[in-house]
Image (tube, helix red, strand yellow):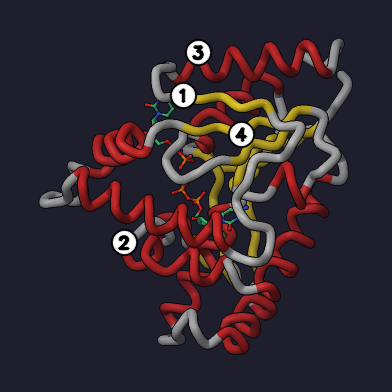
Amino acid sequence: MEKYNIAIDGPAGAGKSTIARRVADALGFVYVDTGAMYRAVTWRVLQQGISPADTERVADISRNLRLELRPGPEGQQVYANGEDITGLIRTPEVNANVSDVAKIREVREQLVRKQKEMTAAKGVVMDGRDIGTHVIPDAEVKVFLTASPRVRAERRFHEMKDSQPGLTIEQLEQDIARRDKIDEEREVSPLMRAPDAVLIDSTNLTIPEVVERILELCRAKAPGGT
Ligand code: CDP
Ligand code: CDP
């Protein structure tokens, strides 16, 4: 089977990881969640009591962290220096700091280098913020996935309400808006739609509908590969 790469970018809560994983399963491709890598560095920075504003120390942490992504039964698992930290990288503390860590040039250079290595053999569905613009600019299929801020916050709320009682949709909407702003305004590879990425607004689309649209793009752009 012909292999190619698929880049999926977009703002927080747009459905990137859910959709990317299903597309990868449908095609027998490898799914890579790059947000988990920025989250892993952030987790380590906070664990060491370092401020994200201390860019030199954060860059040091990122340089010395041995990061591994492994496919697991419930999706991608993240290992840092051999320790499984998959369950530790989606906390409110990491959410609040990850965009400040991700705007540091050295951190991005280190992680983007690793991400490029992962896509060299093709057959990868990768999601993030700069995949179509910087990590795999020659990806055969590029999607910019979005949804209205309110719907994105509502989706996140349904996901988190049982594990975090007291959480409100308004709080999540603010958290998402703050992160989107930092991601869109940063100097190094900001969140933006690549000129050749297909825009999919999933505000009124179900998960299977979005997956089908992307598989259609795959059939059109890489005939014989699906
Ligand atoms: O799942 P969610 O959309 O909330 O976030 P994520 O994909 O796990 O990404 C967390 C954060 O990492 C984003 O808000 C960005 O600051 C950063 N990120 C990035 O800068 N570049 C990427 N390729 C992926 C994530
Ligand atoms: O990775 P990203 O932050 O872009 O989003 P996600 O974590 O994949 O999706 C956020 C939530 O939205 C998940 O609970 C998905 O099941 C849900 N979702 C949805 O309800 N409808 C869609 N069309 C896409 C995602």
What residue type is disc 2 on? Pro
Identify the residue under disc 2. Answer: 92
What residue type is disc 3 on? Glu
Q: N-terminal of the two: label 2 or label 3?
A: 2
Placement of 98 over or under 144, stated as above or below: below
Task: State the CA–CA distance, disc 1 to disc 4.
Answer: 10 Å
Task: State the CA–CA distance, disc 2 to disc 3.
Answer: 30 Å
Q: Kindly indicate the quadrant of the structure image that contains residue 152.
A: top left
Q: N-terminal of the two: label 2 or label 1?
A: 2
Label 1, secondary structure: give it.
loop
Task: State the CA–CA distance, disc 4 to disc 2.
Answer: 26 Å
Q: Position of residue 26 (x, y in %)?
A: 64, 19
Identify the residue under disc 3. Answer: 209
Mark 3 vs ligand 2: CB under 8 Å? yes
Q: Which mark is residue 202?
A: 1
Label 4, secondary structure: give it.
strand
In contact (CB < 8 Å): disc 1 and disc 4: no
Q: Position of residue 141 (x, y in %)?
A: 76, 28
Q: Is residue 215 left or right of residue 51?
A: right
Placement of 220 over or under 170, stated as above or below: above
Q: Position of residue 200 (x, y in %)?
A: 56, 24
Q: Which mark is residue 144?
A: 4
Q: Quadrant of the N terminus?
A: top right
Q: N-terminal of the two: label 3 or label 4?
A: 4
